[in-house]
């Protein structure tokens, strides 16, 4: 009976290690893809930088490097995409006022380009940030 329990514990431990490696590998793949995209991009390619940052921020991996890409993207061009991704980054870091500011700027840029553009997603992100800020 003791041997059976030992074997069961070893199997469970092995399963936990395997699952953690699988989960970590998933994040590593996102980081690899993002880094590859950035390394193949032109120096003034703000969009690739913003999209690479978004990939990492959406998966909550490699956030420090993603923030650097995002800052570079926004320094090249202050785009609606970059501002929205920055808002997502600030939400993750519980900086709700900064998130709201970036979402609002993103929405205004989107509307400036196309007054009838659908900004419902950004508006819902603003509402979410306001609720989290008040909590």
Image (cartoon, rainbow, N blue to C red):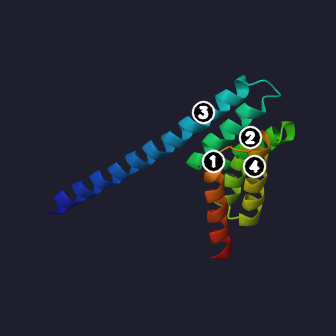
For the point 46% across and 46% down, which residue is it?
23
* Horizontal and vertical percent position of residue 41: 74, 25
Q: Secondary structure at mark 4?
A: helix
* Horizontal and vertical percent position of residue 61: 60, 47
Is tag 2's residue or tag 4's residue first in the polypeptide sequence? 4
Q: Name the residue carrying label 2.
A: 114
User: Which numbered disc covers residue 106?
Assistant: 4
Q: CA distance from mark 2 to mark 1?
A: 27 Å
* Horizontal and vertical percent position of residue 101: 78, 59
- Relative to 96, 10 lies left or right: left
Q: Name the residue carrying label 1.
A: 57
Q: Name the residue carrying label 3.
A: 32
For the point 73% across and 61% down, which residue is it?
100
Is tag 4's residue or tag 3's residue first in the polypeptide sequence? 3
Q: CA distance from mark 4 to mark 1?
A: 17 Å
User: Which image quarter holds the N terminus?
Assistant: bottom left
For the point 28% across and 51% down, which residue is it?
11
Q: CA distance from mark 3 to mark 1?
A: 14 Å
Is tag 4's residue or tag 1's residue first in the polypeptide sequence? 1
């Amino acid at each position: 009976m003791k041997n059976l329990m030992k074997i069961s514990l070893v199997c469970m431990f092995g399963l936990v290690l395997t699952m953690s490696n699988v989960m970590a590998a998933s994040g590593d793949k996102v980081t690899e893809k993002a880094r590859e995209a950035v390394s193949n991009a032109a120096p003034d390619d703000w969009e690739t930088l913003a999209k690479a940052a978004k990939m990492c921020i959406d998966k909550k991996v490699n956030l420090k490097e993603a923030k650097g890409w995002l800052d570079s993207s926004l320094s090249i061009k202050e785009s609606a995409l970059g501002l929205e991704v920055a808002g997502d980054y600030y939400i993750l870091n519980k900086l709700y006022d900064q998130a709201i500011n970036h979402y609002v700027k993103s929405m205004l840029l989107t509307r400036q380009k196309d007054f009838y553009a659908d900004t419902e997603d950004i508006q819902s992100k603003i509402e979410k940030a306001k609720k989290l800020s008040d909590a």
